[in-house]
Image (spheres, rainbow, N blue to C red):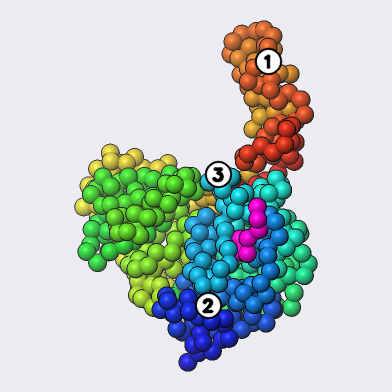
Amino acid sequence: MTQFTDLGLAKPILKALADKGYTQPTPIQAQAIPVVMKGRDLLGIAQTGTGKTAAFALPILHRLAEDRRPAPRRGFRCLVLSPTRELATQIADNFKAYAAHLGLSVATIFGGVKYGPQMRALAAGVDVVVATPGRLMDHLGEKSATLGGVEIFVLDEADQMLDLGFVVPIRKIASQLPKDRQNLFFSATMPSEIGKLAGELLKDPASVSITPQATTVERIDQSLIYIEAQRKRPLLAELLSDRSVERSIVFTRTKRGADRVAKYLTAAGIEAASIHGDKTQGQRERALAAFKAGEVKALVATDIAARGIDVNDISHVFNYELPNVPEAYVHRIGRTARKGKDGVAISFCSDDERSLLKDIEKATRQKIPSFDRRNDKALAAAAAVADKLAPAEKYVDPRKADPRNNVPSELRRKRNRNGAQGKGGQGGGQRDGQGGGEGRQAQGQGRNGGGRNGGRGGQGQGGQGRGGQQAQGGAKQGGDFRGPKRGGGVQTVETRWSPID
């Protein structure tokens, strides 16, 4: 059987692996590491939890250690793009652990935190940067980061990048990379759009495929429960009360739904916390820390967290609502049965979700064993109490829902809220008033005055006020960079779509 010592990795890397107790590579590691060490481009198709982070991290560190050279100022030698903050942090932590005896530097670039520390980390150059696309584009726009020194480019979880609408930013980033570079492309599934993107980025790649597309881990005991939508919460509380449920993740379709489910579980005496894109970075980190420490029995999450949560010993995964995208089912239940252990995945299905279930079973090529808990009188009584503890969310037909509704607010299209065509009139980005007048007394009358608040104070000529600071030279926020000012003047930035995660 193959050992890490058989792969030709540098001794400091082998020492770091031994410190962590790793001796045998997983199948994707055994196949991918020799290819990457040879400098070839790679297309890797592997389920979550198969060890693909080490499959690219180990040979990258080996290459950087063998050819030591300083990273360019504000630049980096290796760039890893990740769809979410949690996943970026997880990847960076792995790089740091494997590079413990190499003296290489690793930094993360993602939204939800201040720009200053990231700028200072990049100033002198970094060996490895793990970034989310939106925040990286902001640094590129502010010239606090450059891509001219990138030797290795890694695109991880490419299919989730597609789900979150990151394809355009990825293409923009790739267009600024040096042509002479090594490209590593990893995805759990290979939809046509991802195949097209891989064709654009990769040059004569080697392919490594560990599992067929959209298959599920065999060690996961899957089941399905038919239940009325309004009775899902009491059913979930009943299942979580079982002693066999040690640590679980509950997946909802929406952020508001995640908060309501967590609130209900807490009221029912079950330790629960929610995590989704609208939470601040601090809230997300505290929720994950409590979950990892065992202080929280159930972590209620949206799909954005499906591949960004790396917590060991998750015994159960509950699909409170079925995902809109069939492949997301695989990523969700892949949070359990990791590192050779067994796991349980239980999904709830209401009548309006039958079409989603059909798509999931078609994509995974299996029939999920089912049970019927409809018309359960005990659950009906508990549902009445549930509505008082946490009011039910307004129903949205899942067949008509956009899967990208689950994207955090800071990832959505950033329009110039107060731009020339926006609500603030034509002051080039004023919030209130026209031509620099004070918002509450701008020209005009009523709500149809010269600005967003043009007529609230009646009629009159406003002096220089809140809105007047930006009447000339375009909107201060014409783009969407929210970092520190640079230079003495106001910089006009092209309005563009920018996911700031």
Question: Measured along the vertical axis of the image, is residue 178 above or below residue 440?
Answer: below
Q: Earlier in the sequence, mark 1 or mark 3?
A: 3
Disc 1 and disc 3 in contact, CB within 8 angstroms: no
Q: What residue sits right under mark 1 in the picture?
A: 464
The percent position of residue 500, horizontal first and vertical second, equals 60, 47
Instruction: Determine the CA span between mark 1 and mark 2.
Output: 62 Å
Which of the two residues, 349 or 172, is positioned nearer the viewer here? 172
Q: Is residue 47 visible?
A: no
| Residue drawn at the location 37% of the way across and 67% of the way down | 312
The kind of residue on which mark 3 rests is Lys
| Residue drawn at the location 56% of the way across and 68% of the way down | 103
Question: Measured along the vertical axis of the image, is residue 269 above or below residue 482?
Answer: below
Which of the two residues, 284 or 372, is positioned nearer the viewer here? 284
Disc 2 and disc 3 in contact, CB within 8 angstroms: no
Instruction: Determine the CA span between mark 2 and mark 3.
Output: 32 Å
Q: What residue sits right under mark 2 in the picture?
A: 13
Q: Residue 473, located in which quarter of the rendered image?
A: top right
Mark number, residue 436: none
Instruction: Determine the CA span between mark 1 and mark 3.
Output: 31 Å
Which numbered disc, 1 or 3, marks the residue closer to the eye?
Answer: 3
The kind of residue on which mark 1 rests is Gln
The percent position of residue 164, horizontal first and vertical second, equals 58, 55
- Bin the neighbour count of mark 3 within 10 Å (Cα to Cα): few under 14, some 14-19, many 20 and up: few
Which of the two residues, 298 or 227, is positioned nearer the viewer here? 298
The percent position of residue 235, horizontal first and vertical second, equals 28, 55
Q: What residue sits right under mark 3 in the picture?
A: 114
The percent position of residue 12, horizontal first and vertical second, equals 53, 78
Q: Earlier in the sequence, mark 1 or mark 2?
A: 2
The stretch in magenta equals 123-129
128 magenta-colored? yes
Q: Earlier in the sequence, mark 2 or mark 3?
A: 2
| Residue drawn at the location 64% of the way across and 77% of the way down | 66
